[in-house]
Image: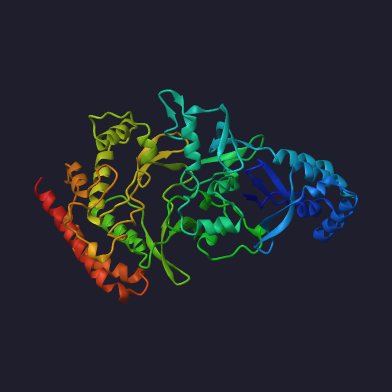
Amino acid sequence: MTKSKNMFNGKPIRAKYDHESKKWLYSVVDVCGALSESENPRHYWTVLKQRLNDGGNQTVTNCERLKLLATDGRMRMTDVLDKDGIIAIARRIKNTVHTEAFIEWLMQFDGSSRKYVLKHKDVSVVEIELDESGSISAFGKILNELHLPIGTVGAKGVDFTAIKEWWSGRSIPASREGLKEFLDSLGMLLPQELLDKSFGLSLSDQYWICPQNDDLKWVDINFFHNSFSEDVGNLLFAQMEVKDADAISLLSPDNTSDGVIKKKWKIIDGKRCLIKGGSGASRQEVANEVLTSRICKRLGIPFVYYEIIEIDGEKYNVCEDFITGDTELVTALHIKNLIKKDNHVSNYESFIAKVEELGIKDVRRKIDMMITLDFIIVNTDRHYNNFGLIRDANTLRWLSVAPIYDSGTSMWCKEISEDINATSIQLTSKPFRSRHAKQIELVQDFSWLNIDALDGIENEYAEIIRATVPEPSKFETRSKKLCLALRKRIEVLRAIVGKQ
């Protein structure tokens, strides 16, 4: 992996970690540029290299050639040396007053780990060390167990493995569209390498990492109240190219965004908004998120409102962040990790009991609303990270079930038109049952449901599809089939409710 943003004396020092030798290798030209007064560091190194060669200096013999990201955005071959070789070269560079300071900086950087304090706003939680890949390699003192991430403290105490998994889970999923190309452009291998570039900050919670012995404050760097770079999001959207790696700012909440669909954060009219795309030729997820918003509004289900936005001729969803600087989202997966499994109690009842124990009393109705909604739209991806709870980040008091979000993988968006069958009992579901026909049986109270409020929603869906899919005329046959299937799902639900 390449560290393209390391600076000494205001100048970048590119470095790459060699996993075989377990050493950092540094660009010799960059070191010459940082320490010499030469306006042409490459020429300076050529002359110095020849002089050392003529003198039989062993350091030059140890030089390797590696591809590193150049200022023109391309990967180019350059001379590199390990720490000892670089120190030897630094001592050969004349007319510099920075040599000892550089060696001290190098010794600190070359360590296999970096020390931080995981914080929750300004509460110091636990001391950690990160390795060269951005993963947690070691722990120091537990400073405040109460503020550790949910699901990382069990009956036997602090689960350090769970903390490591929680941290790595903050990074962009490796399957995200366009991620590999983005990482390649920065000379990185893993998305975890991005985490410390933005202090691990997110727009979903208030956790972050602070370098040890640093006086950084949450109020000065959090993304809820401070601006952030759009470079990462624009690169992931292929809206810009890396022409100068040193000019790219990685201080972005996009480093901690979840999901495989292309997405990015943007400040619009002072609001933190998430822009999200779709997949495949139809990009149907965009239409499905808008449909879900319309259904929830009609049925009185709390939801995140998704609108349509156009970028470079393509349609995307946009929604405002439903988390603030004083609240945070805790996904159901972390709540699930708190549950002591009882084989005689269903996952549905176990989850509801745990949330009620946390103090949220209307959880059953909110979960029943979610199950009913997913039945209507045939959501196949309501896994435990696609719903959750909101808590107060200051008092740690649990506030509510989170509004409905991330419902795009629905309405047969991954299926060919011939497989659309609204009355099939085999339609897959999550999280409590594997089939919608079985999962809807968990709902025993539909008194909140006014199914007549959905009259005509299929016509509204047709309009949404026309407004979002590329070349709507080519999608007309599928659109008609989807709208008919939506109406049938509603009628199947009406029959189920009528039997209660």
- Marks counted in the figure total 0
Position of 436 with respect to 391 (left or right) is left
Q: Give the vertical position of 298 relative to 150 (above or below).
A: below
- Location of the C terminus (image quadrant): top left
Q: Give the vertical position of 454 relative to 137 (above or below).
A: below
Towards the viewer: 184 or 99: 184
Towards the viewer: 55 or 77: 55
Q: Position of residue 62 (x, y in %)?
A: 77, 47
Residue drawn at 57 percent across, 39 percent down: 209
Position of 463 with respect to 495 (left or right) is right
Residue drawn at 25 percent across, 66 percent down: 417
Residue drawn at 20 percent across, 52 percent down: 426
Q: Position of residue 114 (x, y in %)?
A: 64, 38
Towards the viewer: 280 or 198: 280
Q: Residue furthest top?
A: 156
**Does residue 331 appear anywhere in the picture?**
yes
Q: Residue furthest left?
A: 499
Q: Position of residue 424 (x, y in %)?
A: 17, 55
Towards the viewer: 450 or 318: 318
Q: Position of residue 107 (x, y in %)?
A: 74, 38
Position of 338 with respect to 135 (left or right) is left
Q: Quadrant of residue 347?
A: top left
Position of 326 with respect to 339 (left or right) is right
Q: Quadrant of residue 69?
A: bottom right
**Does residue 102 appear anywhere in the picture?**
no
Name the colouring of the figure. Answer: rainbow
